[in-house]
């Protein structure tokens, strides 16, 4: 028996993605074998494949060939020796960083996320990465309170639209920075759009919020945004950057800003956020995923899905995300869900 996956044969454009056939094997000790129902296509898939991720070229960088795909939802179809808590037939998710563009994945059973079977995998898969980032940025890093003001940088993307939706639920007054053609989604969530190509966001916010902002959620993590956006915070304000820094020099500036805001307190705080802490402590993530699944089940959130593709057409999905036209999320689905 065989299964297929989509392999990045080298670093580069979506053209390096090739469908490969593999022998199905029994899961190893402590491992589960999962039939993938849905996989997300997200920005980190692209930066890793293009060799633009921070650690590319260092010993921590991704080795090629590899299967991209940050997160999946699927059904456990076999378990290895020693697996007692995960049952065959269970609906699960996995935050994998790489490996998700595949009909079948093998993953450590103790790192699986329980997913309610009642949820549509296409709608639930954006919760595994984009929504957990948005939720934790808002509720764990910034601890938002209703009625407060927030600026979202990169409001039209997968995480940006999740922030807009969760921000509306949290009762925030929001401003969203996005290109002009994507302003409709920003206003749909009740936020005030700012066109970063034509408007100076600092001027716009200073005029609209003369007392300063309570929160900034920064999905860019570039020098164009970090200092100017931080300067818009009021006393007690919090800025959280969750974007991937484009290089080590930006990362050092980010860490400098973080250190400065702690060593020379000016009443405002700056924090970088990353899902990598999941490796060390799963508990808060599992709690937050359960909350997000409940919100989806209750119809309180509904991720924006820009496009759905068969899993093996991941290259087309990657081209679409790289085109810069996408609003929200792209998902890959197994044939029975299309
Ligand atoms: N911290 C973590 O654990 C974590 C996890 C996942 C992703 N990330 C990072 O978070 C960031 C956002 O991810 P995503 O999945 O939401 O990406 P995405 O879906 O590609 O969205 C990014 C959005 O940014 C907008 N944008 C591009 N240039 C901009 C600029 N100069 N100013 C304002 N907006 C701009 C783009 O649309 P328009 O320009 O057309 O408006 C796009 O919609 C990425 O850097 C990603 O690597 C971090």
Image (tube, grey):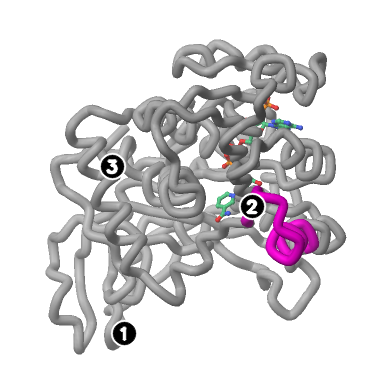
Residue receiving disc 3: 121
Q: Is residue 305 above or below residue 219?
A: above
Q: Secondary structure at mark 3?
A: helix
Name the residue: 31% across, 52% down: 289
Residue at (55%, 57%) from the top-left corner? 68
Say if disc 1 is inside 8 Å of ligand 1: no
Locate the C terminus and report the quarter of the image it occupies: top left
Callouts 2 and 3 close, C-beta under 8 Å: no
Q: Is 186 rendered above or below residue 167?
A: above
Tell me, for residue 12, which label it has, or none: none
Residue 108 x/y as whole percent: 34, 76
Is 298 located above or below residue 193 in the figure? below
- Nearest the camera: 77 or 224? 224
Question: CB atoms at circles 2 and 1 under 8 Å apart?
Answer: no
Q: Position of residue 300 (x, y in %)?
A: 26, 28
Q: Quadrant of residue 280?
A: bottom left
Which label sits on residue 28?
A: 1
Q: Which residues are magenta?
A: 256-271
Between the residue at mark 2 and the residue at mark 1, the CA separation in whole angstroms equals 45 Å
Residue 200 visible in this rendered orientation of the protein? yes
Q: Which callout, 2 or 1, points to the residue nearer the camera?
A: 2
Q: What kind of element bears circle 1? A: loop
């Amino acid at each position: 028996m065989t299964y297929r996956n989509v392999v990045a044969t080298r670093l580069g454009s979506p053209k390096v993605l090739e469908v490969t056939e593999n022998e199905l094997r029994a899961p190893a000790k402590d491992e589960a074998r999962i039939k993938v129902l849905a996989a997300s296509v997200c920005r980190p898939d692209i930066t890793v494949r293009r060799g633009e991720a921070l650690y590319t070229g260092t010993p921590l960088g991704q080795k090629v060939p590899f299967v991209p795909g940050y997160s999946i939802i699927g059904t456990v179809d076999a378990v290895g020796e020693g697996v007692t808590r995960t049952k065959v037939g269970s609906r699960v998710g996995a935050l994998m960083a790489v490996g998700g563009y595949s009909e079948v994945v093998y993953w450590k059973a103790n790192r699986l996320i329980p997913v309610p079977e009642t949820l549509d995998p296409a709608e639930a898969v954006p919760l595994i990465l984009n929504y957990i980032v948005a939720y934790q940025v808002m509720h764990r890093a910034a601890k938002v309170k209703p009625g407060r003001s927030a600026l979202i940088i990169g409001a039209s993307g997968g995480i940006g639209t999740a922030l807009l939706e969760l921000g509306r639920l949290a009762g925030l007054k929001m401003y969203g920075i996005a290109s002009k053609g994507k302003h409709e989604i920003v206003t749909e969530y009740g936020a005030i759009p700012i066109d970063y190509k034509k408007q100076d966001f600092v001027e716009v916010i200073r005029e609209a919020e003369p007392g300063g902002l309570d929160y900034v959620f920064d999905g860019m993590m570039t020098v164009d945004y970090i200092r100017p956006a931080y300067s818009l915070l009021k006393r007690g304000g919090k800025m959280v950057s969750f974007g991937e820094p484009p290089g080590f020099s930006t990362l050092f500036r980010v860490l400098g800003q973080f250190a400065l805001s702690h060593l020379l307190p000016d009443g405002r705080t700056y924090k970088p956020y990353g899902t990598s802490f999941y490796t060390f402590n799963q508990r808060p993530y599992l709690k937050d995923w359960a909350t997000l699944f409940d919100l989806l089940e209750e119809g309180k959130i509904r991720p924006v899905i820009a496009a759905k593709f068969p899993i093996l057409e991941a290259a087309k999905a990657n081209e679409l995300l790289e085109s810069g036209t996408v609003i929200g999320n792209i998902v890959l689905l197994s044939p029975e869900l299309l």
